[in-house]
Amino acid sequence: MLLINNLTFFIIVAKIVKSSVYLCVLKLTIMRSVNIYKILFFLLLVICFIYENKTRHFSQHLERRGLIEISPTHRKFAPAIRAWEKMIRTSDYSCDIAFFGNSLTNQSNFEDYFPNTSIANFGWGGNTLLDMYYRTNLIIASHPKKIFILGGTNDLFYVNKETLINRYERVVDALIDSLPNSKIYLQSILPFNHSINKSLPSNKKVKEVNDLIRQLAEQKHLTYINLYDIYSVNDELNQKLTTDGIHLRRDIGYIEWSKAISKYVEE
């Protein structure tokens, strides 16, 4: 009986020792794992920092939603924009008309419709109104007699109407303050075509924003040009003039736009 009890005792002690060893091994494993995770986390932070420093992807994402505003020197393409401005200033360049906007402006071919007019295209694909605000120096440097603005299309995806029109006003004020003798025209945002792309912002929102742009033009004593109605077929962007529901076909998409602004270009 005593032998059995002693044997049982030794078995219990052995199990305890074995469990302790297992616990120690487990603890060491966990500690090693934690250290590995710390190292991996640190490396991930370094990679994210390098990626963000080169692309400004995350900060742009936050800015577009109105959560932050990137400083001029840290914006994506800031060096290219400064070099562009320097080139304009050093060459003493000037133009009759500056078209200022996003990809809809960038892809335009107004020079084909107005061959006797000196035209500068300051469209930049993907630009929000904040991006445009930080490019106003380019327009100012070129001393245009007239400025045609189309902005806000990309902002519609990210911010509410109030934030959008506040950004728009900053763009307008910057140009008015620096170019008091230039004529400024505010062009409405074009409708989207949802049969081609259902994920686009609603045209109801587009019309509401356009009404705010019209009011801004009246407030600043500027000319408002309604392009929405020209391109709208049953409250959708004319399907014949677009391939993706947003952008216009270069061959025929800008004909009606050119007609709408011709009297202002030629006045």
Image: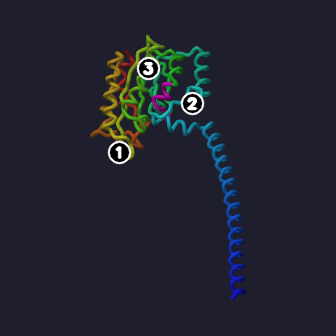
Tell me the crowding category of disc 3: few under 14, some 14 to 19, or many 20 or more residues within 10 angstroms, Cα based: many
Q: Secondary structure at mark 3?
A: strand
Within-10-Å neighbours for mark 2: few <14, some 14–19, many 20+:
some
- Residue under the image location 71 percent in, 60 percent down: 28
Q: Nearer the viewer, residue 98 or 179?
A: 179
Q: CA distance from mark 3 to mark 1?
A: 30 Å
Q: Label 2: state its secondary structure.
A: loop
- Residue placed at 50% from the left, 29% from the top? 131
Q: Earlier in the sequence, mark 3 or mark 1?
A: 3
Q: Nearer the viewer, residue 4 or 193?
A: 4
**Stretch in magenta:** 125-133
> What's the distance in space between the residues labelled 2 and 1, CA to CA?
32 Å
Disc 1 residue type (three-letter): His
- The residue labelled by disc 2 is 75
The verdict on residue 31 being magenta is: no
Classify 10 Å Cα crowding around label 1: few (below 14), some (14-19), many (20 and above). some
Which dot marks residue 147? 3
Q: Which residue is mark 1?
A: 194
For the residue marked with disc 2, what is the amino acid? Arg
